[in-house]
Image (spheres, rainbow, N blue to C red):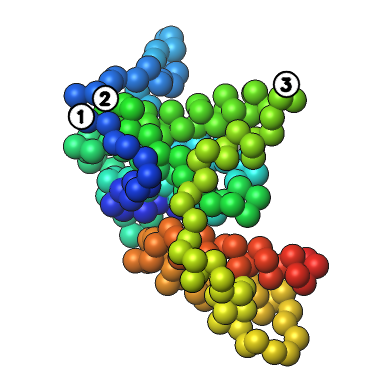
């Protein structure tokens, strides 16, 4: 999972006022040598929970967007005070569709990340009863579609691959990696551009039978 700073909130999702946010009860057990005690989750703890849930539903290309400042390696910088805006949003692809799961219910970044993980876990449990699939239950969280002009571009145009001649899977992967370095939110790009690249790669691989 990668992180993106600052927070990019989905335009179609309302925000909570600071007075509406509440203290969460997400905790972890810590052993002090004599007994186990409950401690507040750290951002790292919450991200670990979230990654497990993303893997469980088959999510790809996850990006967690928040106002937590990052180190050069993309991990949260330690020793930060709690953010004035603790909202977070998880962007990821689920079976080729871009998803956005935002949360600003709680007054700590770590707890909002943990809340997204808890939501995903609850969704998976519902699927076990056979009423609906994970994809169907996440349908309400699909990110806004790309502009019409972007949707009409072929995967060759998006990946900047010639419109004629044979193309190998290795060519697609190389083009994707090259463009992703610039399109990724961590590099100054946008979630929309990255999602378009992801879709183009999926379409290309499907056409190539990979």
Rendered position, 164 above or below 148: below
Left or right: where 19 falls relative to 203: left
Q: Crowding near pointer 1: few (<14 within 10 Å), some, many (20+)?
A: some
Residue lying at 48% horizontally and 49% vertically, measured from the top left = 143
Q: CA distance from mark 1 to mark 3?
A: 37 Å
The numbered mark, 1 or 3, whose residue comes first in the sequence reads 1
| Quarter of the image that includes the C terminus | bottom right
Which residue has dot 2 on it?
Answer: 21
Q: Secondary structure at mark 1?
A: helix
Residue lying at 56% horizontally and 74% vertically, measured from the top left = 153
Rendered position, 101 above or below 154: above
| Residue 127: % across, % down | 68, 27
Residue lying at 43% horizontally and 9% vertically, measured from the top left = 35
Q: Quadrant of residue 78?
A: top left
Nearest the eye: 27 or 126: 126
Residues under numbered marks 1 and 2 in contact, where contact means CB atoms less than 8 Å apart: yes
Left or right: where 1 falls relative to 79: right
| Residue 154: % across, % down | 61, 74
Which residue has dot 3 on it?
Answer: 129
Which residue has dot 1 on it?
Answer: 18
Q: Secondary structure at mark 2?
A: loop
Q: CA distance from mark 1 to mark 2?
A: 5 Å
Look at the image and tell me whether residue 70 can be seen. no
């Amino acid at each position: 999972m990668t992180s993106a700073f600052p927070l990019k909130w989905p335009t179609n999702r309302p925000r909570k006022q600071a007075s509406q946010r509440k203290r969460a009860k997400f905790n972890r057990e810590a052993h002090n040598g004599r007994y186990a005690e409950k401690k507040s989750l750290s951002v790292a703890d919450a991200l670990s929970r979230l990654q497990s849930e993303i893997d469980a539903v088959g999510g790809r290309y996850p990006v967690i967007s928040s106002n937590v400042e990052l180190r050069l390696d993309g991990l949260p910088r330690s020793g930060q005070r709690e953010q004035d805006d603790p909202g977070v949003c998880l962007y990821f692809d689920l079976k080729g569709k871009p998803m956005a799961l935002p949360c600003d219910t709680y007054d700590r970044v770590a707890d909002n990340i943990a809340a997204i993980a808890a939501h995903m876990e609850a969704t998976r449990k519902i699927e076990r009863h056979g009423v609906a699939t994970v994809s169907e239950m996440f349908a309400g969280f699909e990110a806004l579609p790309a502009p019409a002009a972007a949707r009409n571009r072929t995967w060759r145009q998006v990946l900047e691959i010639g419109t004629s001649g044979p193309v190998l899977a290795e060519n697609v992967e190389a083009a994707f990696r090259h463009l992703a370095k610039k399109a990724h939110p961590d590099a100054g790009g946008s979630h929309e551009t990255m999602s378009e690249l992801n879709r183009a790669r999926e379409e290309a691989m499907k056409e190539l039978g990979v």
